[in-house]
Structure formats: C-alpha cells, structure tokens
Amino acid sequence: MDPIYQALVDIAGEEYVSNQPEELYIYSFDLGTAEPCRPHYVASPKTTKHIQEIVRLANKESIPVVPLGGGLSLAGLAVPLKGGIILDLKRMDTIIEVNEKARYAVLECGVSQGQFTSYLEKHHPHLTHSEPGAPPAATIAGNVAIHGQGDLAQPYGFNSDLVNGLEVVLPTGELCCFGSIAIGAGWFTNHPLPDIGLFLGWSGTTGIITKVSIRLFPAKRIRGIGTFVLEHEDLVPEVIFKLTHTQMAEDIVAYSSAIPPFASELQQITVNISADSEKELEFKQEIIWDDTLGEYISRGDGGYVGFSRTLERPQFSKTSDYKKGGGFEYVGSIMPIDRYPECYRKGREISERHGIPYTVTGRCVGAGHCMMFAWTYAFNRADPESIKQAREALHETDDLVLELGGVIWKPGTYGQKLLLDRLDPGARELMRKIKKLLDPNGIMNPGNWEVA
Amino acid sequence: MPFADFKYADLIHRCFRCGYCKFPVHWEDVNNCPPYARFRMESYSCGGRLWLTRAWLNDQIDWTEHLAEILYSCTTCKNCVVKCPLRFNVDIVNMIVAARGEMVEAGKVPPAVKRFLENIELYGNPYGESKDKRGQWVDGTRVERYHGQEYLYYVGCTGSYDARAQQAARTLATVMIRAGVSFGILGTEENCDGNEVHKLGESGLFEMLAENNIKQFKGIGIQKIVTFSPHAYNVIKNSYNQYGGSFEVFHYTQILQGLIEERKINNLMSFNAKVAFHDPCFLGRWNEEYEAPRAILRAVKEVELIEMDKNRDGALCCGGGGGNFQIDLLGGSENSPARRRVREAHEAGANILAVACPKCLVMLNDAVKSEELGDKLAVMDISEIVAKGCGI
Amino acid sequence: MYTVNFDIEKCLCCETQACLTRCQHLEIDKETAQKEILKIARGEDSFVLHDCVTCYACEEYCPMGNHPFYLIVERQEAFNLPPMPRPLIRRAVNLGVPFRGKPEIEEVHGPVLNMAAFSELMGLIQGRLFEGITVISNDGRKMFHYFCQLMYLHYARSSVIKERLPGIIDTISRHKPTEVICFHDECYGTYTSYCPSVGIEVPFKPIHFYEFLYRRLTELKDTIRPVNVKIAYQRPCSSRLSPDKHHFVQDIFGLAGAVCVEREYVDENALCCAGAIQGQRRAGSRRRAAEIQKKNVKDMKKAGAQVCIFNCPACFQTLGPLVANEGIKPMHMSDLCRLAIGEKPMGWR
C-alpha cells in the first residue's frame, strides 16, 4: 500500500481520497485548452484541520499540493503541472455567517456562487453579492482569489476589493487569519490591519484560503437590465464614462459577438438598474436613457433596445456550445476603458484569422477606473486542430494585452511568464522572497509564478 | 467497437463540465446529482461521467470495475437534463444508457448489475425469488385476478416482493376496492416491466420483456393499466409503443385524484399532520406529473402540505433509480441521497414524508432509520395516507 | 422592382382623410391631413414622415384601401428618415439572417401551420385543437427561413422586406401546402395585405390563426366548458392589416364563454403595445411609449379585466409583465381555447 495514499486516507477518509485512474484522469484537466497533467492523488477534505495535515504531509514527502475550487478559471490554474495532490475544496461548503446589519458573509472556501445566491435570495432577500459571470458551480473563494469581478463591479470594484478577511492555511501548515477577525473582532473589515494581499492573485502558490468574509450590498426589490446599442466601437468609452458619472447604474458591460447575427459588428451595452419603487426606477431610467444617452439616440448613433425586469441570476452562458464542441477559453485582461475600440478591432482580427467566431466583452470596474476585457475563443473538444487554433489565438491575445497597455488577468503559465518578464525587478524579487519564505519546499501549486 | 459507431459519438464531447447539472432548479446546493452528492468527486458528477465514458470509448482509459461503478452509479433521475442549459441536454441520460449498453455488450459490468440482470432473466424479478411468491402480497385481500375488468393493476417487482412495499401495494388495492374501481391483477403471471433493465443498458433483455408483456396484456384484452410504481408507468407508457404495445396507462395517484374529484373517495377524515411530498423521478421529471399527488394530499382535512425547497423538477432523487435500488452503489453514508432527503424533510418541518413510488418508500424508510428520525418522521405512501383518511 | 400600389386619385377623392385625422399619435386636422398626405403621395417631405410612430393603424382607417402606411414607410426610406436609430436598424436586419443551415423541406400536400419566427413557442400549439396538423418552421435554428420580414416596416426598410420576402414565400411553397395557417398575425397581414399592395405573388392560401382556432373550437363544441373570465384583448399593430378577420376575436370569446370587458381602447381605437416606439429617435420616445402602455393597462384594469389575451408574442413580451404587475393574467389566445376544452396549457400548474 502506498504510504502517502494511506496517510491521506487516515486524514480525509477512504471515500474522499483516490489514486484511481478515473479520478486522476478527470482531475488532470482544465476545461480550457491547457494540456492535462496527471496528479498522483485526489483528496477532498472536509475541514481546515484536514488541509493542514495534508499540507504538512506534503512538506514531509516533498509532494506538490494544488488547491482546486470550482475549477472554472479556464486558465489551467489548478492543473497539477508537477503532479502531486489535488485538493478538491468543494466539500467545505458551509455558509458560516451572514451579518445583515454590517452586510457581510463568512463562507467556507467551497461555497459555490449558485448556492450563495440562492441562500441570500431565500434568507436575506435584501442583500446580494457581486456575482461573476462564471457558472454557478464556481466558488466564491476561488473567484476572489483570482481577482474576479461580478455584477456589482461598476459601483464597488473587484471581488477581491470586497474582502473583509481570510482564513488561510500556509504552505507549511500553519493557520492564519487576516482582517478584523485576526483580533477577534468579527469579520466586518479588512482595514486597517496589515493587508492580506499575499494570497489573492497568486494562483494558490502562497497558501490555501479556507474561509473568506465578503461584503454584501443592498438588493433592491426591482432588478433589471437595459440594453443600449452602438454602431461604432469608438463611442463605447465615452458612453461608459458618461454612464459611470450618473452613479445610477450597477453593472455596465459592453460586448460584441459574431454569433448570433444580431450582435455582429455592433456594440451592445447592458446596464443593470435596481430600485425599490417605480418612482426610483423611472428616475434612474430617465437619467440614464433620456438625459445621458438621449443625444446618441436623437443623432441616430445609439439605440435603446429596452429594459427587462428579470435579471437572470445565476447567469447563464452557452458560449461553450458555439462550435458545438463543448469548449471555450478566454483571455481576460484588465484594461483602460479607452482601449476598448482597439481591443475589439484587434480581437476580431485574431479570431477571424483562426477561424473562430469572435466574442468580446468589456465589464466596467469601479467608476470607469478600468474594465475587464475578455476575448473568447470557442473550440471543438473532439477536434485537435480546433483546440490548437484556439490555443494559438489565446497566446496571441496574451501578447496583445500587453501591447495595448493592459494587464493579463488570471494568466496561465504562458501569460505569467510574459508578466514576470516585464515585472519591475524590485517587485519580482519581492515575489521570489515571499514565495521562498512562505513555501520553502516549493510544494504549493508549483509551475505557477515561478520567479527564476 | 470503434468510437464512431457509438450512437452519441457526435454529442458526448459537447459537455463542458460547467457543473449546472449538480444543482437543483433553484440552486440551493450542489447535491442534486445523486452520485455526486454521495461521493463529491468530479468523476461522479454527470460531466465527469460523460468525459470518462468518452475517454473509455476512445481507448484513452481502460475499463476497470471502478469505471463501471461510476457509470452505473447514475440513477437516471434526469436532474441533469433539467439543468443543463445546452441543446443536447435531452440526450444526457440516453448517452449514459447507451454507454452502459456498450459495457453490457462487452460483458463488463459490476457484479451486482450482472446478478440483477440474471435474476430478471431467470426469475422475472431482480430479487431472485420464485415466481410463485409474486402474488403472495394479496393474501387476505379481496383482490381478484384480471378477467376483463376495466383496469389491470400492475404492481411491479418491488411491490410484489419487498415487505414494506407490499404493505402499500395491499393498501392501494383496498382503497381502490372501497372506491369501486374495477381492476384485476396478474399475480404470479406478472413479469418485470423492464424499466430498470432498460436503464441498465440491457436492450436485448428489455425488448424481450416488453414484447412478452405486450403479448400477455393483449392476449387477455387489457386496455387500461394503473401502475403502483412510476417506473412501470414510465416504461409502459413511453417505451412499449415501439413494440406494438399501446395502452392507456395511469399512475395510481392520477386515478385516486379522479376518484376524489368524482367524490367516489370523499369525506376523508382529518389527520393532523405536516406532510412533505417527495416527487419520484419517474413520475415527476420523466413524466411531468407533479400535481396529482398534491391534489390528493390537499383533499385530506387538516393535512398541512409543506413543500421542501427542492420540490417538483428540483427534487433530490432517493437514489433508487437506474437499478440502484438493488445494486446499491450509493448507500452506506450520511451523504447518500436518501439520507440527505429525509434530513431535508425533517428540516422543512414535516412529520410525514409522503411518497408515490415503492422504491422511494423503501429507500426513504431505511434512511429514516439510519438517520435515527424514526420518532419524528414517518414515510408513508400516498395510498396509505388516503386509506388512513378513509378510516381503512 | 416592387413598389406600393398607391393611387393619388383616391386621396383626392377622399372625403375624410381618416388615415391622418384619426391618427392616435398626431394631432392633425382635416385640412392639414389633406395637404400632408398629398405631399407624401407626390414624394415630398412632410412632418408626418418624421413623427409617425409606425402603429400601422392608418392602414385600417383609410376608407380607400390605399395603403397610406406602406407609402409612409417607403418615403421614410427614400428620404433617409428612419424612425429608429441606425444601430437598432442594423440589429433588426441582422436578426432576420438565418445562420444555422437550411431547413428540411417535406412536401405536405395539405394544410400546414407556419410558426414563422416563433418556433420556440411550440408549447402554444399543443393538444386536441392542433391534432393532425403539420407544423412548418418548428426548428428554432432554421426559423428565419420562414420569417415574413414585415417587422422592418418599423425600421423604414421596405427594401429588406421586398428583397427577402420572395425567398421566404418560395421556402413555404416548396412544402406544397394547400393552406398556410399563420401562427403570427403579422405573417397573415404580409401575405394578404402587403404582398398584393406591392405586387408580390403569393401562391398559397393564407388562413388567419384565429379563423383556424374558431373552426376547431366549433368542431369541438361539445367539449367546451365556459371559462367565465373577464377579458381584455391586446390588439397588435399587424391586426390593422386584416380588419376583416378581427371579428374572430369576439367569436372565439363567445364560444369559449369569456366575457369581454367594456373599455375605451378597443377595436379601431386599440392602442399598440408601443414596443416599437420606445427605441425611436424622436426625443421623448421612451417616455411616450411608457405613457401609451400605462394608458392601455390602466384602461384594462379600470374595466375589470382578469385576463389579457395576447395575439402577438412581441406584444406579450412587452406588455405581459406590465399587465401581470396590475394583477391581470397575460395569456395567449390558443391557451384560452385549450382551457375552454378542458385542457391544461403547457407549463401551467
């Protein structure tokens, strides 16, 4: 009997550990184009203590550990590049606390977006969280860890900006917490203690988040989505700028896609609006569509499509079936909004060159401070040539992001290298020191953010 | 078999493993796919199963008993069909059944599946019990053999052989007699309906069962059938017509609902209880009948009908479908779907968990015992609730 | 080249100029009306071309059958005065482009029910009323091969209609139908009003959906149990193109045992759903549309309607939530008919 396997079984229980070919096969894959890499073991812990023990075991045996949440980053961030133990964290799915007055929630790392949306709608209908466009099986903690953005990004920022605190298992097995909880004052604030930035955006290479406290926001009675259409991509930045000035909108997303035809070569801008009364709704609609966007409408440059009162949550995506092939991957970037027109034009070019119907999206973050701009490439999983085309398009797009003055968001190893090569030497050296300090044996998701 | 010959070769790669299929209709948790709820490993999720199946059919991974168990752990509850947002969703369970057919064809199935199918072939039931015992449940009742009555009362294997299910089968018969329904049974001449055989991928055996049953039914002039089990309801109503068997098929709750509307069952006595109804998959998601059982419960005075969060097309399967009632790949844990379900009913405030399927009855009854909820929650068949309301 | 068969002599002889004097959205006296319609007829600019909200009503009001609305749309296109902003026009034009392969054509040699661009609404044509009828355009991926295109009247794009419509008619004809029952009222209007007006031949016999429903209900008369609900009817813009079939609304209500409430905005005075108005370029269009909708729904509520029957799925999508908000149940006519014969409509509990 394999002693590491036995040790894992002793920690997590026989039913929650596997070294069988079927589990190793499934867990070797990211859902995007990343090449699979086989782990040696899969373990599904239930408690923080399990994780600590597994991490200590991994240090003792010099075996990598790869934390896995929903597995929907589509950047290969949980592909075990050097084998090791995949920690499937989704069994840790308890919603620990929702504090209505201070508007925050404390969640275990495996709580999914869908589960949490449903829970709030049932038990705390006046509260909502910033829900990303990922499928509802994505985890809250995983999304925060990759600096995700949700449908409240425009007023409130990245999901990682909305963190009040973390509980983390360090790569050497110690348990730490950050934020006000660290002094036993509850989970209500991140500041003003020393910040927790060592665990967000690091692709699980500096520790494993076991609990997260996130900020919640008012959920109004009426929540809907309005759509505005522009012909010229050059107008998108100024329209978004004006919309953010109104302070009346929630999510603002601009997108264009070859399929379906009605979206092709046009820029659709969706604007989420919420209100507690018809009066409030009409007031906001008047400011947005009539006062702010009216000039575009009367010039004939922009069109108001309509406002629907049903805001679909969790959000649905059918992008994976565009090529009837069960696959897609995207390059996400954090980009100045005024680069939207070029992002769109160059993105179309790359897509068309690789025979992929183009799909681009830009989500406004903050008061027009930046946007998450994504280029999506669908592929047919049964066609290796289609996967190759998508992979090439993705790498070209990673290069494009930097060319256009943006930052690659949640990069895979290809993008990580591009960023590291450009990184300020002082920052790069600090990253190296942090990793060395926290993870002396190099067991945490190795192959990612490897600073030479 | 070359992969290209697999019936769903052009569809099976389209699963993105987005995970919608793990959730119920209203997204409460990720525990609505019974094998995933039980094991919480991606290999046991619907998407994992499809990817592994494709890998096996493409010779990327070898057959193992573990792989076969993963494939056979699916209870064919159709939660994935309801939840998958993509166009091929209608074929998800069909793909699993077809893949099982490949394993059957290759002679590579888990031992419990092999035993199940052998018992059907030899004894006409999965228990391996003698046919003579099939009609014993009627002892002490006034139930008659079919001889031209309006309905055939088709009981099925579970109702005929399982002690707890027999009680409910008997009770239903008594209620129908009291209400003046004209029916008869086949008794020892009754044979397995084949629903589970079909879902286990043994299409040849299923065809034989269906054709024999159809020949038998037609031979004695049966036109209308009321089934005790939704499994029989599903297969006779939806699959027998391919083999020339066209009958008017009802699940018993539809008959009871009609009898209540016509006041042939009336003045149901008060029966103070908080009742949650568990939607059986083969009545609910498979045949979209959610209301007949509820209408019956609402007709019983002082019964408070409670809805669990996961109800109707969002119900959590008891884990008994797809042959798992006998094969039992999902038992033995507090995460077993049946145990999760009874905990749900208890948390919803019910003191009775009403069912309309003999497999659900037995699965959930056992789960109540495992959860030590015996003094707080009783599992009752709808027929038993009606009988109690009638003072039977 | 197809052009609207408009006869200026008819306008000169007209005593009422009802096309413009009865317009619900423009205040026009008789003298102004005569001046403006003649300007339009002669190919000159008119404020009507700028301010028309495209409700189609003047097609019905015209006592001469002279197609004033179709002419207005042609002039709007010629003068480049589309009521909609360019992106919305482009979006709409692209919407009608089929992009998922060609439909499979099976010859029927019998009556067909054409779902046109509403293949996703097969749930509305279930049950005994529709037993035995062959449905064409039942695949959402191919439905734009059956799309009648008349929607582009709202976008001043008669050219798109004329370019695409012959191909659509050809696709339908290849099914060899004896009759084509038009699920969507606008399809019926296209083949019986628009096509003759511009000289496009229609080689099949269009049947109005309500005529079909009435016929079937009559055949199933013995199974009808009166529904006993108070109903308001949302008359769509396209109904103005087939006023001779409008009586079937009341005929069906009568058979089904539904009581039509007495309200102001009915029949020739009906208000459109304003779905095509809210995005128009003219300043204040969004609010204008909202006011029309509010007036319409308030009228239904005041008259005591319990149910609002919709003809057109687009009206249903636009007004449905608004009527539901007022406690009035939105419903399609075919579902009402199913209720009347004791069936449960699809998706209902």
Image (cartoon, coloured by chain):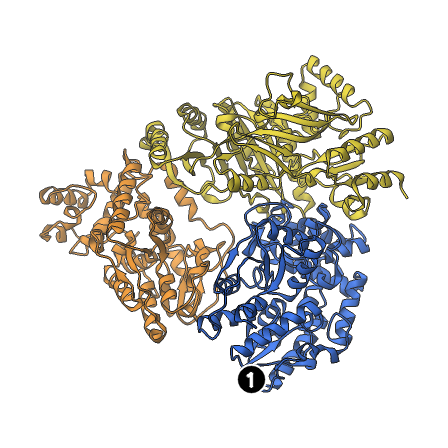
Chain colours: A yellow, B blue, C orange
The correct choice, above or below, for B81 with respect to B166 in the image is above
Asked if A246 appears above or below B384 in the picture, the reply is: above
Tell me which corner region of the image, top left, top right, bottom left or bottom right, holds residue A18: top right
Q: Nearer the viewer, residue C56 or A154?
A: A154
Q: Determine the image quadrant of residue C121.
A: bottom left
* Residue B6, visible in the rendered structure: no
Q: Secondary structure at mark 1?
A: loop
Furthest toward the right, the residue is A1
Q: Nearer the viewer, residue A322 or A123?
A: A123
What residue appears at the point 44 percent right and 55 percent down from the top-left corner?
A: C145
Which amino acid type corresponds to the residue marked 1 in the rendered image? Gln
Can you give x and y, in whole percent of width and height, for residue A286 in the image? 33, 31
Corner quadrant of residue A290:
top left
User: Can residue B138 be seen in this snapshot?
Assistant: yes
Percent x, y of residue C280:
31, 38
- Give coordinates of residue A292: x percent, y percent: 36, 27
Which of the pair C99/B351 is nearer the observer? Answer: B351
Task: Determine which residue is flagged by label 1.
Answer: B149
**Location of residue B199 with respect to A122 vertically, above or below:** below
Q: Is residue A143 left or right of residue A175?
A: left
Please state the total of marks drawn on the protein image: 1
How many neighbours does mark 1 have within 10 angstroms: few (below 14), some (14-19), or many (20 or more)?
A: some
Residue B328, percent from left and from top: 74, 59
Q: Say which chain tag 1 marks.
A: B
